[in-house]
Image: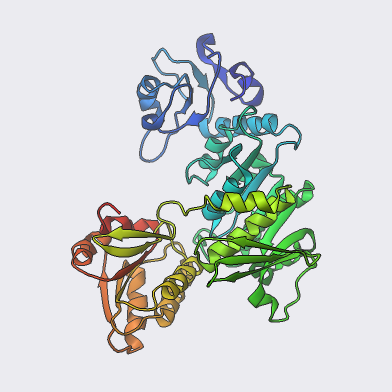
């Protein structure tokens, strides 16, 4: 981090009794996860007061703490009116110092879905000297924690994931992140409960690209975003990815389009750049959504100067992170495991991939409710039930009250030989799952913790 002696220049804080550590490492906010040299953020929440854990943080190696109230402990303490606000100010100063006037590019990723996958793919393509979002923390505090980890001697690039769920958060994030490159992965009616309308949510997410455009950076988004007015106004300044199937529908896209096509039989991705330059990449088997993210990430990496041969070599190392579209084994059965989160777009993508990959055999669909859809929840779940590609012999288990709507829609279809079941929670369904045989599909919002259904997987 910044020299601790300079912290008062960036905040309204001061070091208590002149105790100043000689050096300060990244921030941590959970004393149980503190490491040697880190700075503990004594944040107060509804569940706990971080000031109560300074001793534990020090025991685990913290060299200082940022506090709102001085504590009786022999640990350097930086006293501020608000811990989170001070941490944001210091993280912003850290980002400016690291960025070296744009010579170290920072990529910001937003959108309603696919952000973490895009972050993981792009960080892999850009190489080892890339800092990516700390764990899966994409809220304001997570951004602070990530920016505090920027090191001039270790990182030449950074990829920051930005998640928002209420008005004003994108503006707050942009003031800290100050991205050189902006990506929106897609838009859907997700996390809308704190917004007046979907239009307000779209406008909030589009701020990321406007911020980058204003500062002279490059912006990217898929053609699906063009159905929203804020993205159409950005089209001429953006690189827009278009699937070949959409291109064939004679839709009009800007000249900066990057067309992609994926041959599922050969797992080959073909990219066509604006000047009709073709490139072919070999990929692992993946869903259409993952392919779209891969095409977008390649486009960004190419614009940053990376060669096709290098990117192909990096792709050979790609594997989905835990809980995000992985095939696993459970009691000699195959499980398609995609339970990190769920929304209508991601659910549709995962369902289509699973259906394509399982042309025969008995399938067990375990579907957890899709949360945070607000007014769109009922229709989204009913549509899922109406369109789920079940066949005779399949079993469908819905978990959570939202999925009761989807299960009813499946029953109304009167599909012969399809068993439809329902449980309120994953705990209720666990014993039932253990006794069943077949090929499992597992997807739902994190709220339902569907990993509880299985042991070691």
Residue 240, how many percent across, how many down? 71, 64
Nearest to the observer: residue 445 or residue 376: 445
Query: From the image, which quarter does the N terminus lie in?
Result: top right
- Quadrant assignment, res 333: bottom left
Residue 301, how many percent across, how many down? 68, 51
Point out the residue furthest to the top here.
Answer: 18
- Quadrant assignment, res 15: top right
Q: Is residue 433 above or below residue 60?
A: below
**Does residue 456 appear left or right of residue 218 in this picture?**
left
Residue 230 appears anywhere in the view: no
Nearest to the observer: residue 323 or residue 139: 323
**Residue at image x 32%, y 66%?**
400
**Does residue 399 appear left or right of residue 26 in this picture?**
left
**Does residue 94 appear left or right of residue 370 in this picture?**
right
**Residue at image x 25%, y 62%?**
332
Q: Is residue 316 above or below residue 188?
A: above
Residue 77, how many percent across, how many down? 48, 18
């Amino acid at each position: 981090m910044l020299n601790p002696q300079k912290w008062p220049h960036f905040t309204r804080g001061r070091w208590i009794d002149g105790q100043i550590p000689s050096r300060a490492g990244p921030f941590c906010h959970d004393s149980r996860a503190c490491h040697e040299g880190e700075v503990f953020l004594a944040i107060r929440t509804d569940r706990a007061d971080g000031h109560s854990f300074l001793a534990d943080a020090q025991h685990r190696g913290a060299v200082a703490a940022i506090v709102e109230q001085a504590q009786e402990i022999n640990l350097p303490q930086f006293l501020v009116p608000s811990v989170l606000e001070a941490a944001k100010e210091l993280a912003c100063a850290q980002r400016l110092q690291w960025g070296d006037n744009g010579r170290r590019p920072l990529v910001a990723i937003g959108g309603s879905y696919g952000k973490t996958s895009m972050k993981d793919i792009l960080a892999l393509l850009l190489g080892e000297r890339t800092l990516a979002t700390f764990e899966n923390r994409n809220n304001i505090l997570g951004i602070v924690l990530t920016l505090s980890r920027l090191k001039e001697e270790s990182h030449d690039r950074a990829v920051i994931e930005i998640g928002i769920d209420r008005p004003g958060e994108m503006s707050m994030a942009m003031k800290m992140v100050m991205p050189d490159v902006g990506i929106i992965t897609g838009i859907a009616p997700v996390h809308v409960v704190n917004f007046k309308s979907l239009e307000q949510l779209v406008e909030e997410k589009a701020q990321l690209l406007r911020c980058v455009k204003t500062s002279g950076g490059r912006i990217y988004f898929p053609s699906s975003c063009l159905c929203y007015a804020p993205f159409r106004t950005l089209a001429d300044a953006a690189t827009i990815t278009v699937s070949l199937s959409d291109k064939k529908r004679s839709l009009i896209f800007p000249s900066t389009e990057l067309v992609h096509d994926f041959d599922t039989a050969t797992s080959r991705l073909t990219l066509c750049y604006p000047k009709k330059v073709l490139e072919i990449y070999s990929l692992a088997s993946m869903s259409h959504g993952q392919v779209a993210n891969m095409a977008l990430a390649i486009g960004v990496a190419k614009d940053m100067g990376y060669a096709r041969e290098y990117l192909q070599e990096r792709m050979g190392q790609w594997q989905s992170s835990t809980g995000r579209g992985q095939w696993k084994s459970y009691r000699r059965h195959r499980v398609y495991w995609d339970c990190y989160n769920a929304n209508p777009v991601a659910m549709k993508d995962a369902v289509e991939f699973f259906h394509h990959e399982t042309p025969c055999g008995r399938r067990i669909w375990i579907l957890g409710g899709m949360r945070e859809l607000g007014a769109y929840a009922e229709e989204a779940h009913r549509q899922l039930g109406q369109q789920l590609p079940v066949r005779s012999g399949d079993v469908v288990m819905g978990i959570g009250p939202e999925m009761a709507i989807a299960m009813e829609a499946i029953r109304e279809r009167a599909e012969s030989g399809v068993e439809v079941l329902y449980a309120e929670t994953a705990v209720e369904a666990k014993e039932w799952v253990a006794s069943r045989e077949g090929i499992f599909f597992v997807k739902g919002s994190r709220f339902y913790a569907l990993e509880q259904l299985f042991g070691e997987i």
